Amino acid sequence: MAALVAAWRPESVFAGGEVPLAPSTPYNVVSASSGSAENYSLSAQFGSRSYRIAVQAFGETAGEVDFAVAKADAAFLDKKLTVTGWDLTTAQVEAASPLLRDTDIGELLYKTVTYTLTAYPTE
């Protein structure tokens, strides 16, 4: 989330579940997985972890949504994030939704973009 705040402005980036009641548009909601273990060895030790970062970009117009997606791409796409004790691959887009309307929150438009990356222990 810090990468996206740095690429944009703090009042336009929220963690999942922490969006205020009436945020100004456009804005992004960021959620990250805790990572799933992969590539187990015969000794039952995993060799890497797979992570997903989901960004929901909201706006009143398609242009606002595209602007918010561009900010998310600037923060994550092809970027190598840093986590102590891990060597991470660059983040890639796993999936992107079409433009949708969210009638639950006052007719805003949104897209969801999911970025994936893999982490390898540095030890």
Image (cartoon, rainbow, N blue to C red):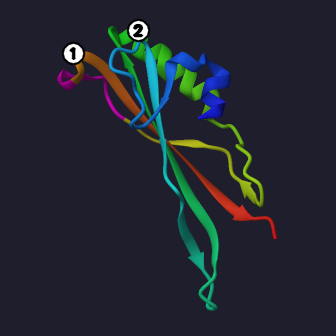
Q: Residues within 10 Å of mark 2 (few under 14, many from 20)?
A: few
| Residue 94 % position (x, y) | 47, 45
Furthest residue toward left: 103
| Residue 11 % position (x, y) | 53, 17
Q: Amino acid type of disc 1? A: Glu
User: Residue 32 shows which numbered tag?
Assistant: none
User: Magenta stretch?
Assistant: 97-104
Front-lying residue, 58 or 92: 58
Furthest residue toward bottom: 43
SS for tag 2?
Answer: helix
| Residue 119 % position (x, y) | 66, 59
- The residue to which callout 1 is attached is 107
Furthest residue toward right: 123
Q: Eyeballing the image, is 83 above or below 44?
A: above
Please identify the quarter of the rendering in which residue 57 is found. top left
At 66% from the left and 37% from the top, the residue drawn is 78
Q: Eyeballing the image, is 43 above or below 52?
A: below
Q: Eyeballing the image, is 82 above or below 13?
A: below
Q: Quick one: quadrant of the C terminus? A: bottom right
- The residue to which callout 2 is attached is 63
Q: Residues within 10 Å of mark 1 (few under 14, many from 20)?
A: few
Circles 1, 2 touching at the beta carbon (< 8 Å): no
